[in-house]
Image (cartoon, rainbow, N blue to C red):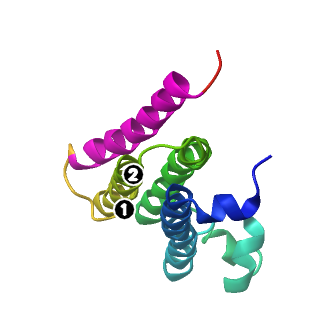
Amino acid sequence: MVDLTQIMDDEVFMAFASYATIILSKMMLMSATTAFYRMTRKVFANPEDCVTFGKGENAKKYLRTDDRVERVRRAHLNDLENIVPFLGIGLLYSLSGPDLSTAILHFRLFVGARIYHTISYLTPLPQPNRALSFFIGYGVTLSMAYRLLKNKLYL
């Protein structure tokens, strides 16, 4: 059984923990950004959220969609779809004893790709900016999964 202090002394695991914290903080920021856009544009998805701005029929005018709010919401949803697999596979990968420089390259590429994906989604930048950043991040997660399956798991 591995002692927790051994894991905390592992440089690869600590690098993973650092980059996971950065990317999770970015994802949390997307929640706040979505709420900010909803409040400033007075656009809500649920009737109970509209009560703050009016009652009855007056409140219903705030129950609508807005292109900017939807763009932020979709960027956040895309984060959820990509960051969760990275966290699971990245954790297993970091515990499998990879080379430190290779692991840090994987983590940096993923975090950079996700941050650039958000910038290109919200700005919006023309394609293929967003697609390239998506595929870089996806490719990094696939690369870690491949290395993990190839070298460490018993199939």
- Is residue 141 found inside the magenta-colored segment of the image? yes
Using the image, tell me which numbered label, if any, was put on residue 110.
2
Q: Is residue 8 left or right of residue 69?
A: right
Can residue 66 be seen in this snapshot?
A: no
- Residue at point 35% right, 52% down? 101
Main SS, magenta region, reads helix
Q: Position of residue 32 (x, y in %)?
A: 56, 75
Q: Helix or strand or loop: what does disc 2 sit on? A: helix
**Which residue bears the numbered disc 1?**
115
Q: Position of residue 29 (x, y in %)?
A: 52, 73
Residues under numbered marks 2 and 1 in contact, where contact means CB atoms less than 8 Å apart? no
- Residue at point 50% right, 22% down? 150
Neighbor class of circle 1 (other Cα within 10 Å; few <14, some 14-19, many 20+) is some
Q: Helix or strand or loop: what does disc 1 sit on? A: helix
Q: Position of residue 63 (x, y in %)?
A: 63, 65
Q: How far, Cα to Cα, is label 2 from label 1?
A: 9 Å
Q: Is residue 116 above or below residue 92?
A: below
Three-letter code, disc 2: Phe
Which residues lie in the magenta part? Answer: 129-152
- Is residue 119 found inside the magenta-colored segment of the image? no
Give the camera-side residue of 13 and 28.
Answer: 13
Give the camera-side residue of 3 and 126.
Answer: 3
Quarter of the picture containing the C terminus is top right
First in residue order: circle 2 vs circle 1: 2
- Residue at point 39% right, 51% down? 110
Give the camera-side residue of 61 and 31.
Answer: 31
- Residue at point 38% right, 48% down? 106
